[in-house]
Image (spheres, rainbow, N blue to C red):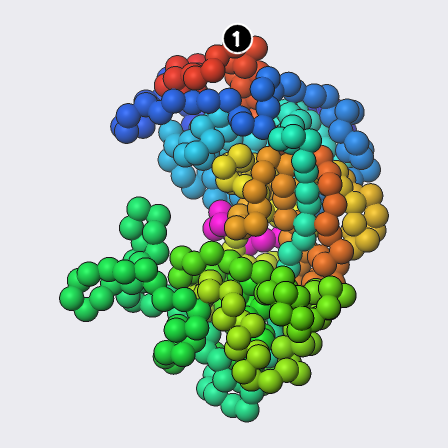
Amino acid sequence: MIRALIGIIFVLVVAGSCRTPLDPVEPPAQPVEQWSEPQWETVPRSLAYDQLPGWDTADLEPGVQALRQSCDKIVSKNPNEFLSKRQLWGGRVSEWIPACGALSVVGDQGSARAVLQALFTPIRVNPEGGNSRFTGYFEPTFQARLSPEGRFTDAVLPRPTDLVVRNGRVLQRRSDGSVSAYPKRAEIARRADRGFAYMRPEDLFFLQIQGSGRLLLPDGRTIRAVYAANNGHTFVSTANWLMRKGWITRSQASMAGIKAWMASTSEERLRAAMNANPRYIFFAQKPEGDPSLGPDGSQGVPLTPLGSIAVDPGFHPLGAPFFVKTSAPGLGGEWSSLVVAQDTGNAIKGAVRADIYFGTGDGAGQRADTMNAPGEMWILLPRQVANRLSTASNAGHDQIDAGEILSLP
């Protein structure tokens, strides 16, 4: 069975190569960039799959589902493009197309392992200074209204027309054409115009921390509020601010504890606590779509529960699959699985730093809240990309011309 499957994979790879010829490909028209080795590894070294802890028993289904989503996005690009403009060592789209095409023969765990082992090479991601951290996040659900009603007073605002981004800075464009720093949370909330939904103040605050969520309307409909923009100000921890004020204890410094405090405190203290964090998030309204999938991540594909992770794009290309090992009560203890880099986050900084997407709703949130542990990561690269990476590193190149190293044979 496996031998027959390998034969099918070979045919698919050849077919994929025919659709995207592996003849010398014209490099992009822009100036040739300097390619450097991954910051997380001095000399990338490939491993055998039997060296991955838990590979033979891991549930690969969520990761394969997520990888299919990423592959659909990848293969829609120009084959000459790099998978990532920041991480050129990840190779060109044309080098990922055959491996993505082979996912069509995956029907169960056995065939998933056979395809991945035949077409991808695992390379261990070394943490800087030995530091690693895995956390969890989820898509919350909140009650909402389409017009102000009772405690549903705070508007879910779309991206303002006066918000502009110039050279990475978020600015406010004034009527005379001049620009200035965008206002902080307090001023935005005070001048809030009509939103596409209305929420309890503390619910909107936590929706902004999560970055997206589902809004449940009284008539049974569900809409998605998806991250659209921010006001450019740095996030400030509300938990730390409240503890310094003496308004909560350390035992209350969880999402559930802070939310409970906000729901019971005075309006004055509630606004003061929220305004201590000047960062403000604007949202786009989207239909719910497939309820089993999460919102779109930074790669532009829907997140898959326990199959998607947020990573630091300064270290890793979005769309790349990883095998990870970590532990958490919400994962049932020790856990190894296939996941795909499909999202980013302001708090996700480092080479072995990932935020695991747990799904939607309170149950997913409770499980995600238990996730805070060290772990290990291996990036799975198409064999051609992995071989070139290892060869270039072994040759001792510090700066390698992208046109030379990434040219296709």
Disc 1 is placed on an element classified as loop
Residue 292 rendering spot, x and y as whole percentages = 64, 61
Secondary structure mostly taken by the magenta-highlighted segment of the chain: loop
- Residue 65 visible in the current orientation: no
Residue 4 rendering spot, x and y as whole percentages = 71, 26
Is residue 299 on the magenta stretch?
A: yes
Q: Amino acid at mark 1?
A: Ala
Q: Nearer the viewer, residue 405 or 118?
A: 405
Task: Give the residue displayed 68% in from the left and 50% down from the top.
Answer: 135
Q: Which residues are magenta?
A: 298-304
- The residue at which mark 1 appears reads as 395
Is residue 148 on the magenta stretch?
A: no
Task: Give the residue displayed 69% in from the left and 45% down from the top.
Answer: 134
Extreme residue in the front direction: 245
Residues packed near mark 1 inside 10 Å, few (<14), some (14 to 19) or many (20 plus): few
Residue 247 rendering spot, x and y as whole percentages = 66, 73
Q: Is residue 254 left or right of residue 400?
A: right
